[in-house]
Amino acid sequence: MRPLKWLAIFIVPMGIIIAAVPQNTTKPYKLTAPQLLAEANNRTQYVTPETVADMIVNKDPSLQLIDVRSQDEFEKFSLPGAINIPLTDLLAEKYADVINQDLKTNVFYSNGTVTANQAWMLTRQLGYANNFVLEGGLNYWFEVIMNPGKPVTTSPDEEFARYNFRRSAGSALGGGGAFQAQTGQSQAAAPKPAVTTGPKKKKVAGGC
Amino acid sequence: MEETKEIKKTKYLNPYVGGVLLGLVLLAANFVAGRGLGASGAIKSVVVTTMQTVAPAASTGSGFVKEFHQSHEGNPMKTWLVFEMLGVLVGGFLSGAIAGRLKVKVEHSPKITSRKRLILALAGGVLFGFGSQLGRGCTSGSALSGMAVLSVGGFITMMAIFGTAFALAYFFRKNWI
Amino acid sequence: MGPLITNGIISESTNLFLAFIIGIGFGFVLEQSGFSSSRKLAGVFYGYDTVVLKVFFTAAITAMLGLLFFSLFGWIDLSLVYVNPTYLTSAIVGGIIMGAGFIIGGYCPGTSFCGASIGKIDGMVFIGGLFIGVLLFGLGYKLWENLYLAKFMGSPKVSTSLGLSDGFFGLLLILAALGMFWVAELAEKKFPREEY
């Protein structure tokens, strides 16, 4: 009986400890607070409406718009190709593969930028890459893409280029009136945010 | 005075010590590879490789092979379990060598012949091989590793294995006792 | 920190190499505990040698405690560790067939490799049988595919299904195992036999 007694004496207290101590469910955050602050201050998460419009018009397959408003608002209006993940459900398991991946460029949007930024903060904190925020949200989108303001004649060329781009994008996306861009003016679409690929953390297949 | 009926003991490790060591090996496996130990999966790898080598056209249509490739990419022999089982052979050999237990023989109860033992071993193997596929693991992969991670499937399979063996033990007692 | 492979701390090749090393440890401990002997293995079903029970359950509770403590210290992320999926019908039927194989053949796949490695011919024959059994399963896959895939329940843990915390269930399991060991020792005293 002696070895059994020793085993019992050693292992039962360990069992009691593990039963008593609350489970450690905190997932280690991948980004520290200072890192996150730095990124937020640099506004690295923003994507301009022009860039997104460009991707939509060119049917870029890597774009994935994510509407973080409620389902009702999503059904009333949504951007082309957008899916609806209300902020309240952002961390649900079924969306885990959407917000944590390295193939597509996810762009969160909401009416303003508050909710979209909250979504970005949460996912960035967990270390997920390739999630961005639509600058200005839908409000700015409507103002700028659907109804761009014509720049005054003294504005620099880039302003005109941007205006032309916005008008043509807007008409392509269903905004006001057909519009022919004047020839000779370069597109001012900002470069697409680069998709960072990283090793995707998958559970190992085991068993057998 | 010594008892007339002395129990012969061979020099095996104390089972509790062995159990703790085995538990540590299992813990290491989980820590390193995120999975537990296993054995029947290595056999599955060998079978899939054989099927693919002998009848490549037919095996591409086989549901079994397809199911295997769903969870394993690349060469079927280059899996964690195959490497692990190779290690088991080496480890067992080392242990046997150290303890002086290396001996080619057929181990059987004195009440049956070697031949019968081998036939039983073959039959048992066929049953176990078949069952391990259904159970998605054997005692190492499903029962032991499953219990360590508290998997329901692991517990169920373990209880089914041991329950059935206990239930049938009476009918096969002549082969062992 | 752990599991090392999913967190990218080691490469796939290192993982396979470590699999080999872990296998050596596995085989060594199994053989040292006597699992290379089919007569010892079958002994638990007749009461004369309960080594299977003791080693098996001690290993299970050791590893389980280890994982829970590692998780407590933040050394491993348990959500990334493989939890065996539960296919209810197939788990039970497979277990029954394996149980029959166990009592008839006296080995299980892991221990048969162990036995074969020290020269036991019955171990080698068992491995041959395993191959045939798996092959039969594969060849006739269509016949039992439905059974195989039936009643998939995800990968539930027993603790969650019972509504207990992992730690508390762990304690219950430890107590149950110790109880079984105590009964096993009584049985061994009652049926003493020459050790194989």
Image: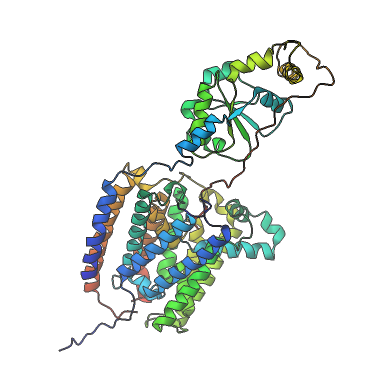
Q: Position of residue B25 (x, y in %)?
A: 41, 64
Say left or right for C49 vs C95: left
Q: Quadrant of residue C64?
A: bottom left
Q: Position of residue A62 (x, y in %)?
A: 67, 34
Q: Is residue A38 visible to us here?
A: yes
Q: Residue at x 53, y 17 (%)?
A: A72
Q: How is the image coloured?
A: rainbow
Q: Position of residue A45 (x, y in %)?
A: 57, 30
Query: Farthest left residue?
Result: B1
Say left or right for B166 vs A131: left
Query: Farthest right residue?
Result: A183
Say left or right for A108 vs B171: right
Query: Farthest front residue?
Result: A154
Query: Of residues B101 and C126, which is closer to you in this image?
Result: B101
Query: Of residues C125 and C146, which is closer to you in this image?
Result: C125
Q: Is residue B36 visible to us here?
A: no
Q: Residue at x 38, y 80 (%)?
A: B109
Q: Quadrant of residue A33?
A: top left
Q: Residue at x 68, y 55 (%)?
A: B60
Say left or right for C46 vs A94: left
